[in-house]
Amino acid sequence: MIKTQLNTDRIAMTLSFACVIHCFFAPALIIFSYGLLSFSIESEIVHYFILFLAVPISSIALMIGYRNHNVLSFLMIGIVGLSVLILAVVLENFIGETGERAMTLVGSSLVAYSHYKNYVTCKNLDCDCHEKIN
């Protein structure tokens, strides 16, 4: 059986940080590369694409973590974080760019925190849900 807890937690944390990096640094990248990009990084497609990746990967990692460690708080924090990320994209027209950035930062931080705590709990318990890495 392939154990996926370590990889899914790492991928989910990376996607959380990708949301923050995209949200805060994409405008600067566009300014510096104005005219060079035919595809706008600020496109709504990017937001939906990141969510398309983040929601299932994070959900799987959090569910595996809950099943292995029975710590409900990490699962709930992750679900709240994912919900905030989804709301940031859905409500963008109502909350504006600043509201979207704030919600993205909060949601991504919650998701990353839940995966990090899940990962640390597993390492502290020395459980058998991760691959052995030398």
Image: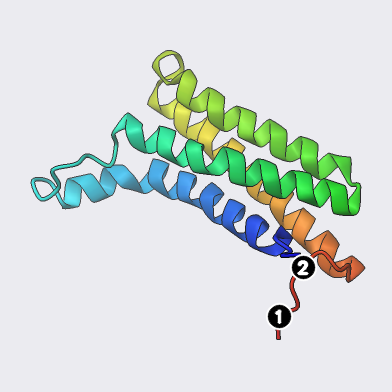
Q: Quadrant of the N terminus?
A: bottom right
Q: Position of residue 70 (x, y in %)?
A: 91, 47
**Which residue is under mark 2?**
130
Residue neighbourhood size for the residue with mark 1, other residues' Cα within 10 Å, grouped as few (<14), some (14–19), many (≥20):
few
SS category of the residue bearing label 2? loop
Quarter of image, res 7: bottom right
Look at label 1 and name its amino acid.
Ile
Q: Which mark is residue 133?
A: 1
Q: Position of residue 72 (x, y in %)?
A: 87, 40
Q: Are marks 2 and 1 in contact (CB under 8 Å)?
A: yes
SS category of the residue bearing label 1? loop
Q: Residue at x 31, y 45 (%)?
A: 26
Q: Is residue 9 left or right of residue 24?
A: right
Q: Position of residue 99 (x, y in %)?
A: 47, 25
- How many labels, in total? 2
Q: Relative to 57, is 44 above or below?
A: above
Q: Residue at x 34, y 30 (%)?
A: 44
Cα distance in 3D space between marks 2 and 1: 9 Å
Q: Is residue 71 left or right of residue 31?
A: right
